[in-house]
Amino acid sequence: MNEWIIILVLLILFLVLRNILWYAAFKDFSRRQFSDPRLKSKWRWTLYFAPFGYLFYLKRYYNMPDDYC
């Protein structure tokens, strides 16, 4: 019985973290202006299908050279 409680708590924490990351991504995408529509659609699909896709987006976006966009 205790293992089911632990699994349930971990699942709830995972879902909460996923929703927080999705909301952060939504706010970031709604505030940021993209000059390349292909880049915008690529990251939108990454966010929909990967629960932690926003973390990959942040790592990739902030490591881009200044003249990328």
Image (tube, rainbow, N blue to C red):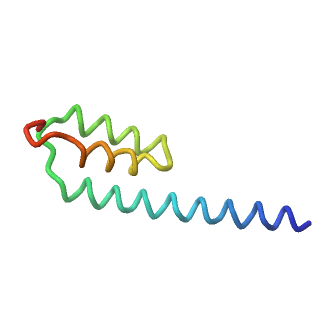
Pinpoint residue 38: horizontal percent, then vertical percent. 22, 31
Compared to residue 34, the image places residue 30 above or below, namely: below
In the picture, measured across the screen, residue 30 lies left or right of residue 58, that is left
Name the residue: 18% across, 35% down. Answer: 37
58 vs 49, left or right, is left
Residue 31 falls left or right of residue 59: left
| Residue 24 in the image, given as x and y percentages of width and height | 36, 61
Q: How far across and how far down the image is residue 43, in percent?
A: 32, 40
Q: In percent of the image, x 33 and y 47: which residue is there?
A: 59
Residue, far left: 67
Residue placed farthest to the right in the image? 1
Determine which quarter of the picture holds residue 16: bottom right
> Relative to the observer, which residue lies in front, 69 or 33?
69
Which quadrant of the figure has residue 23? bottom left
The front one of 57 and 59 is: 59
Number of marks in picture = 0
Which residue is depicted at the point 81% across and 67% down? 5
Residue name at image x 14 percent, y 50 percent: 33
Question: Residue 4 at x, y = what percent?
Answer: 84, 62
Q: Is residue 52 left or right of residue 12?
A: left
Query: Viewer-proximal residue, 63 or 58?
Result: 63
* Quadrant (top left, top right, bottom left, bottom right) of the C terminus: top left
Which image quadrant: the N terminus? Answer: bottom right
